[in-house]
Amino acid sequence: MTITAAPKPNLWTRLAHPGQFVALTRTWLWPLTIITVAVFGIGLWFALFNSPQDYQMGDTVRIMYIHVPTAWLSQFVYGVMTVSALGTLVWRHPMADVSMKAAAPLGAAFTALALFTGSLWGRPTWGTFWEWDGRMTSTLVLLLIYLGIVALWRAFDEPLRAARVVAVFTLVGAINIPIVKFSVDWWSTLHQPASVFTTSGPHMPPSILTPLLVMAIAFTLLFLTLHLKAMHTEIARRRLMALERQAAQAGAAA
Amino acid sequence: MIDLGPHAVFIIAAYSGVTLVVAALIGWTLLDARRIAGKTTALEARGIRRRSAK
């Protein structure tokens, strides 16, 4: 087999090289940013100007258009981290732990926003900012798990040493995701059951479902854009650490 | 802006909070990238190179 006859590496293998990953995905950032801004514009127009009051909630239904997407994202981001953790431990893909590290602060922020917006919706609707019911408590636990993961990354000087420990912690914490999801079915909770993804389809009219889904897509695009940028920064950070180590060695040798 | 009803303050507070946090996330992501790029440029200006780049 000659060099010209050698098989071309597939995309997954090429993405494993940090430099190749950045080179291949750098061009995605501006298109993603523009699409994110556009979808947010459409979503906010629907949410604030082109959707009716809810027959029960009145105008506070508009909080749902930011609460539900951030809540969905809090679970979706943990799903991304769980897959990345498997990528680290099982496939040893070099970009997997970069993905895990970049996603954690974003997931924590979205979870905090879900709790914040949920509280502001709960006060006029239920008469309380907070109850220790299944959904709210498990989402608070999810926030604490995210913050623990962020702290764990910072506890290690060397990111590659941290990666396996954080991956195991992430996989253990993943048990909380089905608990958050099914808490409204398993326990008698104040938080209402699912009304979008049910076996009989969405339980809301298109006039309410449309802004909800558009805002959900907008927030997901926001996460993907920020996640990609943060991954590029993490790769640059590790390269910087290698350069600083070399500078220190050069300084010590001099 | 349409009339936000009797609970307008909660709606405005929710959207304001989300806007602030999202703006902070975007700002932090961009600032972090800029900081790392600046430090890397400074080191490379001193002649420090990766072993693979030599």
Image (tube, coloured by chain):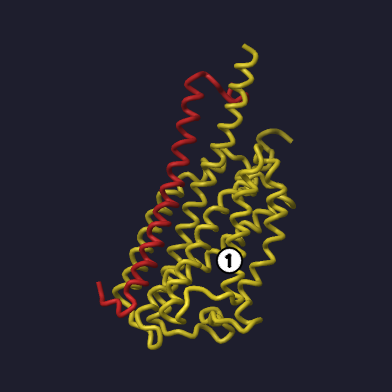
Q: Nearer the viewer, residue A124 or A79?
A: A124
Res A219 → quadrant: bottom left
Percent from the top left, x then y, of residue B30?
43, 44
What residue lies at 37% left-to-right and 68% top-to-bottom? A43
What residue lies at 46% left-to-right and 36% top-to-bottom? B35
Percent from the top left, x then y, of residue B53?
58, 25
Q: Nearer the viewer, residue A131 or A111?
A: A131
Quarter placement of the N terminus of chain A: top right
- The chain displayed yellow equals A
Percent from the top left, x then y, of residue A135?
58, 74
Q: Chain of mark 1?
A: A
- Location of residue A184 with respect to A10 vertically, above or below: below
Q: Is residue A5 left or right of residue A206?
A: right
Q: Is residue A158 left or right of residue A67?
A: right
Res A38 → quadrant: bottom left
Q: Is label 1 in a helix, a strand or a loop? A: helix
What residue lies at 52% left-to-right and 19% top-to-bottom? B47
Residue behind mark 1: A140
**Identity of the amino acid at label 1?**
Leu
Question: Drawn colour of chain B?
Answer: red
| Residue sticking out furthest to the top | A254
Q: Is residue B18 left or right of residue A91?
A: left
- Location of residue A201 with respect to A85 vertically, above or below: below
